[in-house]
Structure formats: C-alpha cells, structure tokens
Amino acid sequence: AQSVTQPDIHITVSEGASLELRCNYSYGATPYLFWYVQSPGQGLQLLLKYFSGDTLVQGIKGFEAEFKRSQSSFNLRKPSVHWSDAAEYFCAVWGSGNTGKLIFGQGTTLQVKP
Amino acid sequence: DAGVTQSPTHLIKTRGQQVTLRCSPKSGHDTVSWYQQALGQGPQFIFQYYEEEERQRGNFPDRFSGHQFPNYSSELNVNALLLGDSALYLCASSLGLRQGFYGYTFGSGTRLTVV
C-alpha cells in the first residue's frame, strides 16, 4: 500500500537559515508527489508537485523539492526561511491506479525563530 | 473567482448526534472530495463525489455519508457521532474525476468538536 512518512514532526530554524523537510514515500510505480502548506486556521495550499521529468521542481514562495527515486524521497527545501513560513507542511502522494485521492504524511510543523 | 467554500467554520456537537457539513466547489470544478484531519495528523481521504455519485471511498464507516447536488455542491453527513470524530473536515474540489492531481483546491475546513 502507498504511504508517506515525514520523519520530523517538529522543526525549528532561525529566520534566514536554510530549511529542508524530509519526505519518504512507498509506492510501486512512478509517483505523483506533492507538498502542501497549512497555516493555522487555513486549508491546504499547494507549494509544488512532481509528475515526471526534471527531478528538481520549483514551487511558490521560493520553495523547491528534489525527487530521488533511489532513496524514495521528495525533500522540500528553501535557502532562506522567513518568519511567515511558520506553518505545517504536508507531503503527499497520489493514490495508485489514478484513484483520485491524495495520501498524506503526518506533517511537519515548522517554527521560525527571530 | 471564489475558491472552495465550506460551512460552518466551527461547530460543537454531542456524542450520538448527527451533523451535516457543506461544501461549494471552486467555480468550474465538478468533483468534490472530503478529507478528515485529526489533530496532529495529515488529512485522510473519506470519499469523492462526481456526477452526484460516490466514486471512491476511504476506510471510513458507513456512519459517514455524503451527497452531491446538481450544482456540484456537496454535503458530508456523520451519524451517531463519537468523540473520535472530532477533527477538521476539509473539502477539495477539482475538474474531472481523475484530474485532481492537476489541480486540487482545498477549502479552509470545518472544525468539528464532539463533546
């Protein structure tokens, strides 16, 4: 069965520091992968997605992610974090067989120190 | 261009009661999916509606049911509420049954508290 693991439940970084959020997936074929962000009291906003092709994908708000098939990973990165990036981040994979559903990881809460 | 609208934003119910949550999809979208997000967890897929029929269902009991109307809006009904049903319920819309990976739009959710 497909699954997504986000090993870090909570991460704290200083403003201006770089960020990497880890995501590992379990999937038999080429996955469709996503990163979403959720601010308090808000719904989910899509940051970026990977379908195929270039394994380094660019997203909104200065985020990027790299798909590594050999490691079954899709880590999210940002070179310089802003205080407004504090939120919860979810990695997700599209269900196999084009089932029409997203399978989410548990999420990583990002705290940004001034 | 309105996004996904969910109502109410918050509500409190008592164990054993029934609740109905509502969702209006983004303009132009015809498919609605519902997710449950328990505190500290990622969203979990409940079901998906397209052409007024339930097309996909996650691992949720029959107490969870839904409906889609001709204008594509949708309702989620939960009967015999349990404390464990307390969660944020998210609605997501997309165009086409299997096109959500191109463009899922999420609403802000309904926070349900069961006491």
Image (tube, helix red, strand yellow):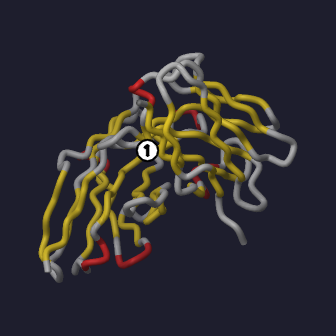
Q: Residue at x 36, y 78 (%)?
A: A62
- x, y percent for residue A112: 18, 72
- x, y percent for residue A109: 25, 56
* Residue A29 visible in the picture: no
Please state if A98 lies on the left or on the right of A25 as rendered.
right
State the SS at label 1. strand
Toward which corner of the image does residue B42 lie, by quadrant? Answer: top left
Please state if A75 lies on the left or on the right of A37 as rendered.
left
Residue corresponding to mark 1: A93
Please state if B13 lies on the left or on the right of A110 as rendered.
right
Please state if B22 lies on the left or on the right of A97 as rendered.
right
Which of A31 and A108 lies nearest the eye of the viewer?
A: A108
Which of A87 and B17 lies nearest the eye of the viewer?
A: B17
Disc 1 residue crowd, few under 14, some 14–19, many 20+, Cα 10 Å? many
Toward which corner of the image does residue B98 lie, by quadrant? Answer: top right
**Depicted B113 relative to depicted A32: above or below:** above
- x, y percent for residue B62: 59, 16
Q: Residue at x 74, y 55 (%)?
A: B29
Q: Chain of mark 1?
A: A
Q: Residue at x 77, y 49 (%)?
A: B30
Type of residue at label 1? Val
Which of A2 and A61 lies nearest the eye of the viewer?
A: A61
**Depicted B75 relative to depicted A91: above or below:** above
Which of A114 and A48 lies nearest the eye of the viewer?
A: A114
Q: In the picture, which quadrant includes the C terminus of chain B?
A: top left
Query: Number of labelled discs?
Result: 1
